[in-house]
Amino acid sequence: MDMLDEKQIAEVLDKFYERVRADDLLGPVFAVVADWDEHLQRLGEFWSSVLLISGRYKGNPVSMHSIHAHLIRPEMFARWLELWRMTTDELLPLPVAAAMQAKAARIAARLSAAVLGSRPTGTSSVKEDAVARPYKMTAEFSDSTIPAPLLSTHSLKAGTWGVIRIRLGAVRYLEQDKALAVVLNPENPGVIAPETPHYLELIGPVALKIEFYDRKPANLHS
């Protein structure tokens, strides 16, 4: 994942678990952690392996959570994800935060299924009218048909959000002056915030479309 390093991961984890430990729902569960320095180090290794493909983590998160299954309730996963979204949105550029949130949602679903035999409460029971839906989407573009304006700096109007969905291949999403560069692929869609100058850079054959929303999309993998 472009524009993310070990230091940023550590900063996210420090702030996130500061919130977790102070949380009324999650705090009591994490009170079982005896050595937070060691715990944060292991968490850093885990997320480094997940996000940077570093291979640093050698443990088994399912077995670690299963030990404390008697303390874990389904709604805790939803709260965990809520705090994760809050922290990543606060500390990271939007496309990077969105990618980390998507990874976390998949991890939470797997852990919940493995430890509790259920999906996290709140992740699949959102009321239909509360879920952001695209009001418009483009046709699918290839590397040979993608409109030239998408390859030069442009912005969405105020109040409009975009999601770049890749079916095949990959593109690089860059914000103005290359202050942010993220590779988008089928597993990592990109979020475009309103009034944010950006452009796409082709890095090979690709098939993509763009969806438009009137509010920030909450679930990129729906």
Image: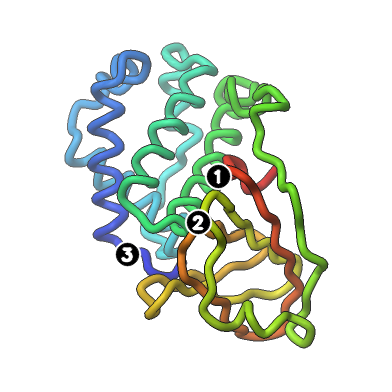
- Return the disc, 2 or 3, that comes first in the chain's sequence: 3
- Return the disc, 3 or 1, that comes first in the chain's sequence: 3
Q: Of the residues shown, which amino acid type is indicated by label 1? A: Lys
Asked if disc 2 and disc 3 are in contact, CB closer than 8 Å, the reply is no
> In which quadrant of the rendered view does residue 114 lie?
top right
Q: Which residue is mark 1?
A: 216
> In which quadrant of the rendered view does residue 37 lie?
top left
Q: Nearer the viewer, mark 2 or mark 3?
A: 2
- Distance CA(mark 2)–CA(mark 3): 22 Å
Does residue 96 appear left or right of residue 90 in this picture? right
Q: As rendered, which of 123 and 69 lies closer to the eye?
A: 123
Local packing at callout 3 (Cα closer than 10 Å; few below 14, some 14-19, many 20+) is few
Q: Which residue is mark 3?
A: 5
- Point 64% across, 22% down: residue: 118
From what the image shows, is residue 20 above or below residue 91?
above
Q: Of the residues shown, which amino acid type is indicated by label 3? A: Asp
